[in-house]
């Protein structure tokens, strides 16, 4: 099957996260941010029929509440329109950063503890933190592809579990710009589990 833009949608891939807008991107010029947000809304409107046709559910990670009301409305519409799809889960990282994810996770832990008997009994460990991450429902990644040709993981795409994956298993690919998602998926399959 093909998406609305003609790219192949590869069967067998259950989870895919794409970094669409970093928390660091707010430092860009306002005109560029406005353009990117308009492009996001256009993309969502255009791609939902292809997502539904290919049984792909759309989800998001990041600080959605800091995006404009019009962007949040379009995101909610697209998420609602695809929520019953049972194939691949496509997660867009919008206003995402690893540091903001950790801050939000710890704020959530403290809030939860405060409403559940106070901080005295709180035991913070990896499992506790994982339960409060944006990605708590997502499996750990099998492969990280950075399309800029870089091998480093920056805050924009540096999910906490990505760092763990790189440390424990050393899996990271730096690819030249222009690679499509289907190509990256084929490469991941070729490398095996």
Image: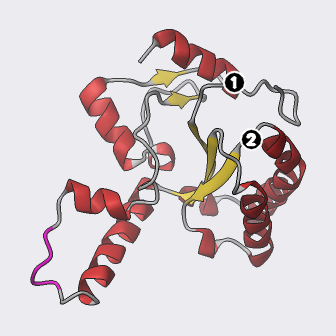
> In the image, residue 99 lies at what x, y percent?
39, 59
> In the image, residue 180 lies at what x, y percent?
71, 25
Name the residue at 61% across, 74% down. 66
> In the image, residue 132 lies at what x, y percent?
36, 65
Q: CA distance from mark 1 to mark 2?
A: 12 Å
- Main SS of the magenta part reads loop
Name the residue at 25% across, 30% down. 168
Q: Nearer the viewer, mark 1 or mark 2?
A: 2
Q: Crowding near pointer 2: few (<14 within 10 Å), some, many (20+)?
A: some
Disc assigned to residue 88 = none
Disc assigned to residue 55 = 2
Image position of 154 with respect to 71: above or below: above
Comparing 51 with 158, the one in front is 51
Q: Quadrant of residue 175?
A: top right
Whether the residues at callouts 1 and 2 have beta carbons within 8 Å, the answer is: no
Which residue, given by chain and number where applicable, does mark 1 sit on?
10
Badge 2 marks a residue whose secondary structure is loop
Image position of 64 with respect to 167: above or below: below
| Highlighted range, magenta | 119-123
Horizontal side of 95 relative to 105 (left or right) equals: right
Name the residue at 61% across, 61% down. 27
């Amino acid at each position: 099957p093909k998406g609305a833009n003609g790219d192949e949608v590869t069967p067998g891939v259950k989870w895919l996260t794409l970094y669409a807008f970093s928390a660091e991107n707010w430092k860009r010029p306002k005109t560029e941010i406005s353009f990117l947000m308009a492009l996001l809304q256009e993309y969502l409107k255009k791609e939902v029929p292809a997502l539904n046709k290919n049984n792909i559910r759309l989800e998001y990670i990041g600080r959605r509440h800091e995006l404009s009301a019009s962007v949040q409305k379009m995101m909610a519409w697209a998420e609602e329109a695809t929520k019953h799809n049972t194939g691949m889960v496509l997660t867009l990282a919008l206003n995402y950063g690893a540091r903001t994810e950790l801050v939000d996770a710890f704020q959530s832990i403290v809030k939860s503890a405060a409403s559940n008997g106070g901080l005295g009994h709180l035991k913070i460990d990896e499992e506790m933190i994982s339960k409060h991450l944006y990605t708590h429902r997502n499996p750990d990644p099998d492969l990280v592809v950075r399309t800029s040709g870089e091998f480093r993981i920056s805050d924009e795409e540096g999910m906490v579990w990505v760092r763990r994956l790189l440390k424990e298993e050393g899996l990271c690919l730096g690819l030249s710009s222009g690679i499509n998602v289907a190509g990256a998926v084929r490469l991941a399959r070729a490398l095996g589990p």
